[in-house]
């Protein structure tokens, strides 16, 4: 096997290990405090809660569309070179992506105020990487340009974005009346690392030449911005990576601000509408910033050697002259200008129908000014619920969407499960399961998507899990 298939296999697998996370199992799973993180306006019945530090919220999601490891390495009798060419190089398109999101809560807590409003606060670190398949770059690198005369390779195929950010947040959740509960959360961002290259244009084409057999033309307008990468390299060389991450995570890097909003609205006692918008915000990158650009156009036909004039200077370096000419026409520049990046904003929405046995409610006291007469402000809690959810996130190639159907089951106030079926660009057979256990004051939860894929992970294009531990106290006024 030649080295080119190996290079592309490594590239695909690396990108797979490296999507903003759709937490469809956690969304509206109100027995878990972390449901407030995906809807600040979610229903809640806690007097106070505290997450176990670094264990209250751990989540990871990885997805790759268009191909899986099994597509390349399955023992199907096909030549590996043919599979790489047909299924990766030519099989993937610029809409296919390789992406990962992870989130780790350092601490998370909440407490109820005097007027039954719930205040929440915490800190978490989040990483998000997405790479769209650079189709024309891949074909050019794999096949070369010898047999691609006249084909324009689109340099705009390069779209990649990655960030690592520490988030501090404080929110308030308040029931306004018997039907409507709203919430808002303020966020401060401390950027650790950032890499992005999305607004690229240009082409590369090989045509028949005038003075030589072939002429190569490049017209490029490429740009890549980074923040923190140079300092990261220095810290790696010096053995000070821990200090690097701690400093930039606690406002020693790039700073930004944003907010989340959400609501829960009861259409009637059994039908509930929810919605939330997360990470409406930005980060101002001003620390260890580098911008790399390649802009210009040039047509070359190789080294021109004109005889007998070339013999007059035997020390003349024709190749270097060609390189200098190209660098003049298509200069590569580095600058250190500050820039602003916007967060990958996410939208959630759901419609839920509750039914079955009514359960004893642990919801907050209805003795406040927004409670109805005779306790009419209290909403019943039911053993069962079914419904649908919508998820959208803004991405470099436009919004990405997922649709989810779910069934939620409460077993008293001790255990709750949620099963989901989700359709998105990664899978049409994504079944998920979430479990929440309440053992006295201890709440433990674990969730996982795409369960049927665990029988053969190599054939899976998507994997996701979440878990956490909390201590919860309820109001029993």
Image (cartoon, rainbow, N blue to C red):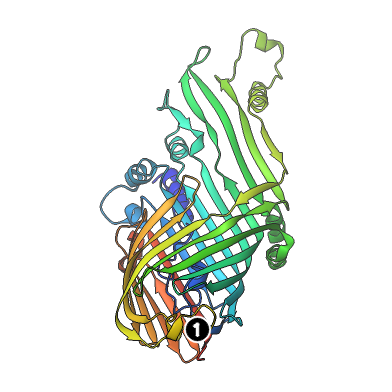
Q: Nearer the viewer, residue 417 or 178?
A: 178
Mark 1 Cα within 10 Å, few/some/many (few <14, many 20+)?
A: many
- Residue drawn 49% across the image and 80% down it: 371
Vertical placement of 373 versus 157: above or below?
below
Is 304 drawn above or below residue 56 in the view shown?
A: above
Q: Is residue 429 above or below residue 89?
A: below
Q: Residue at x 43, y 86 (%)?
A: 374
Across and down, in percent, residue 459 comes to: 33, 59
Residue at the top extreme of this rendering: 308
Left or right position of 318 against 88? right
Tell me, yes or no, if residue 12 can be seen here.
Answer: yes
Return the residue found at the far left. Answer: 77
Q: Does residue 249 appear left or right of residue 36 in this picture?
A: right
* Residue 53 visible here: no
Q: Residue 267's quadrant in the figure?
A: bottom left
Image quadrant assignment for residue 331 = top right
- Residue at image mark 1: 364
Where does residue 270 sit, x and y in percent of width and height? Answer: 34, 74
Q: Residue at x 69, y 51 (%)?
A: 285
Circle 1 — which element? loop
* x and y percentages locating residue 323 in the rendered image: 64, 26
């Amino acid at each position: 096997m030649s080295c080119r298939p190996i290079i592309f296999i490594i590239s695909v697998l690396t990108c797979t290990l490296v999507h903003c996370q759709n937490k469809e199992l956690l969304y509206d799973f109100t027995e878990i405090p972390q449901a407030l993180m995906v809807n600040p306006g979610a229903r809640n019945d806690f007097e106070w809660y505290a997450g176990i530090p670094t264990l209250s919220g751990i989540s990871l999601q990885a997805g790759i569309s268009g191909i899986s490891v099994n597509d390349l390495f399955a023992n199907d009798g096909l030549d590996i070179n043919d599979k790489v060419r047909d299924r990766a190089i030519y099989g993937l398109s610029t809409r296919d992506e390789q992406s990962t999101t992870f989130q780790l809560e350092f601490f998370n807590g909440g407490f109820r105020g005097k007027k039954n409003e719930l205040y929440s606060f915490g800190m978490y670190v989040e990483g998000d990487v997405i790479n769209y398949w650079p189709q024309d770059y891949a074909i050019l690198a794999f096949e070369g340009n010898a047999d691609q005369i006249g084909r324009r390779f689109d340099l705009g195929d390069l779209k990649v974005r990655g960030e690592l950010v520490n988030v501090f947040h404080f929110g308030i959740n308040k029931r306004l009346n018997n039907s409507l509960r709203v919430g808002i959360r303020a966020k401060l961002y401390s950027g650790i690392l950032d890499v992005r290259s999305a607004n690229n244009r240009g082409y590369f084409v090989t045509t028949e030449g005038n003075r030589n057999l072939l002429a190569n033309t490049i017209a490029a307008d490429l740009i890549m911005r980074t923040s923190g990468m140079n300092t990261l390299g220095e810290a790696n060389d010096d053995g000070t990576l821990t200090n690097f991450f701690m400093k930039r995570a606690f406002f020693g890097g790039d700073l930004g601000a944003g907010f989340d909003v959400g609501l829960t609205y009861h259409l009637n006692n059994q039908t509930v509408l929810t919605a939330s918008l997360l990470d409406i915000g930005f980060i101002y990158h001003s620390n260890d910033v580098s911008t790399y650009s390649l802009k210009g156009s040039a047509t070359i036909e190789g080294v021109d050697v004109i005889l007998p004039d070339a013999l007059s200077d035997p020390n003349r370096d024709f190749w270097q002259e060609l390189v200098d000419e190209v660098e003049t026409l298509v200069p590569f520049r580095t600058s250190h200008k500050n820039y602003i990046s916007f967060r990958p904003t996410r939208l959630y929405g759901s419609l839920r129908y509750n039914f079955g046995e009514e359960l004893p409610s642990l919801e907050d006291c209805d003795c406040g000014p927004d409670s109805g007469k005779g306790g009419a402000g209290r909403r019943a809690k039911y053993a069962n619920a079914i419904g649908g959810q919508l998820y959208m996130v803004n991405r470099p190639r436009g919004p990405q969407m997922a649709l989810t159907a779910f069934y939620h089951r409460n077993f008293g106030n001790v255990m709750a499960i949620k099963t989901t079926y989700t359709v998105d660009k990664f899978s049409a057979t994504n079944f998920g399961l979430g479990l929440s256990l309440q053992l006295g004051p201890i709440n433990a939860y674990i969730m996982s998507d795409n369960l049927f894929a665990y029988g053969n992970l190599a054939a899976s294009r998507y994997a996701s899990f979440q878990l956490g531990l909390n201590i919860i106290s309820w109001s029993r006024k």
